[in-house]
Image: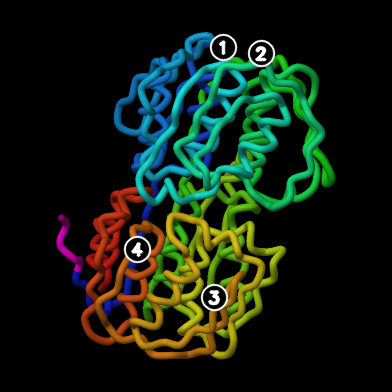
Amino acid sequence: MNSPLRMARSSPLRGTVRVPGDKSISHRALLLGGLARGWTRISGIARGADVRATIRAMGAFGVQMQQHDDVVIVHGTGGQGWRSTNAPVDCANSGTTMRLLMSVLSSLGVTGTLTGDESLGRRPMRRFAEPLRQMGATIALSGDGVAPVYVQDGARLHGIDYSLPIASAQLKTALLLAALNAGGSTTLRGRLDSRDHTERMLPRFGAAIRRDADRIVVEGDAQLRGVFLEVPGDPSSAAFWIAAGVLVPGSEIEIRGICLNPTRTGFVRVLQRMGAHIETYVVRNEPEPVGTIRVQSSTLRGVNVEAGEVPDLIDELPLLAVVATQADGVTSVRGAQELRVKESDRIAALASLVESMGASVQTAPDGFTITGPQPLRGAPVSAFGDHRVAMSAAVAALCAHGETVIEGAETVAISYPEFFGTLQMLKGNAP
């Protein structure tokens, strides 16, 4: 068992950092590489536990890959190299791995059982299985609609016209991946306002896709080809340095090589609206806008975050709760009910975190309200087995009075293994 991590209030943070490759893009690049024909070379891939789970799981289904540091070469066979297995395939804590593999296996006619850790075993899978069943997939779940997920070789999938009931990038991507090997075309409508990495990446691999504000259409029987891809830095990981730079007096931080996709920069836009000194610079645009973020310590004011903004900062909302405790006035978030079914119940977790450190928060089924500024004091806090809660607790500790003890800090390895090393570097660069 890992020992709790002890942290204290920080001096100014100064320096230039690069964050791990984007986790969402890494998952998608690996899977599309496994469906393409020819080699796909992915550089800058995320090295956290979630992406490692996708690499291991694809290997268990017969996909051949080579990895050296942050470069992975996928030996694509146009989907023909995937094979059924009777042994359960462990997706660890990665909901993206399980949900997207459910789709890929169904589209290829590959039989397999997908399992995960205790946390993943509580996360909902029915909303993914049901539209895939409409396409002809044979998928069985446990009695509560959760893992293990059993995918059976069945009839070939066919395209459907489907309206997304929620803004979910995972659900949208699962259906787009299934559509690639289905008969006919697949049209998605409804809540399309979520991360669009898959839509940006599909043409790069040679898929026929059309999209506008109201629908996405993908043609089946796709002939994908291997490509070279460079994964930009993960905005969800960068968010912790953005928040730390804003909150710790005297700080100046620059983050380079970061993905600046508008569907991923909602946290930056909200902090700018709160008065944060944050500048962004795009240096290239294809297939993702990539550039630099510069941040300085700032005086903040509270804001309202509406439901329409939530999909673009869903992963950063626990961190926003920490920031809100230091802002002048009321910060309110609504429309974030999806936080209840992440790696933890993140609304309950963020409330526990800020309340343990002496701040008050009002929670709702779909969000929270915090009135600031409220001083934070060091205290024992739990990460609840959630990497984003652990890093949010670390940021809170940087501006709290007294010692903070984080139980479960090792969970940062799920997405950002180098997090605490980077923090020490930023502390060391301060004058």
Q: How far is disc 3 from disc 4 in space, using C-alphas?
A: 29 Å
N-term mark: 3 or 2: 2
> 349 or 286, which lies in front?
349
Determine crowd level at label 3: few under 14, some 14-19, many 20+ residues with C-alpha closer than 10 A. many
Apparent side of residue 5 relative to residue 199 in the rendered image (left or right): left
Magenta stretch, main secondary structure class:
loop
Instruction: Evaluate if marks 1 and 2 touch, with contact meaning CB atoms under 8 Å apart.
Output: yes
Q: Which residue is mark 4?
A: 384
Q: Which residue is mark 2?
A: 223
Q: How far is disc 2 from disc 4 in space, using C-alphas?
A: 43 Å
Viewer-nearest of labels 2 and 4?
4
Q: Which residue is mark 3?
A: 276
- Against 366, residue 156 (above or below) is above
- Locate residue 140: give its quadrant: top right
> 159 or 176, which lies in front?
159
The residue type indicated by label 2 comes to: Gln
Viewer-nearest of labels 3 and 1?
1
The residue lying at 64 percent from left, 52 percent from top is 263
- Locate residue 380: give its quadrant: bottom left
Q: Under tag 1, what secondary structure?
A: loop
N-term mark: 1 or 4: 1
The residue lying at 59 percent from left, 87 percent from top is 330
Determine crowd level at label 1: few under 14, some 14-19, many 20+ residues with C-alpha closer than 10 A. some
Instruction: Evaluate if marks 3 and 2 touch, with contact meaning CB atoms under 8 Å apart.
Output: no
The residue lying at 79 percent from left, 29 percent from top is 160
N-term mark: 1 or 2: 1
The range drawn in magenta is: 1-5
Residue 118 placement (x, y as % from top left): 36, 49
N-term mark: 3 or 4: 3
The residue type indicated by label 3 comes to: Ala
The residue lying at 67 percent from left, 38 percent from top is 130
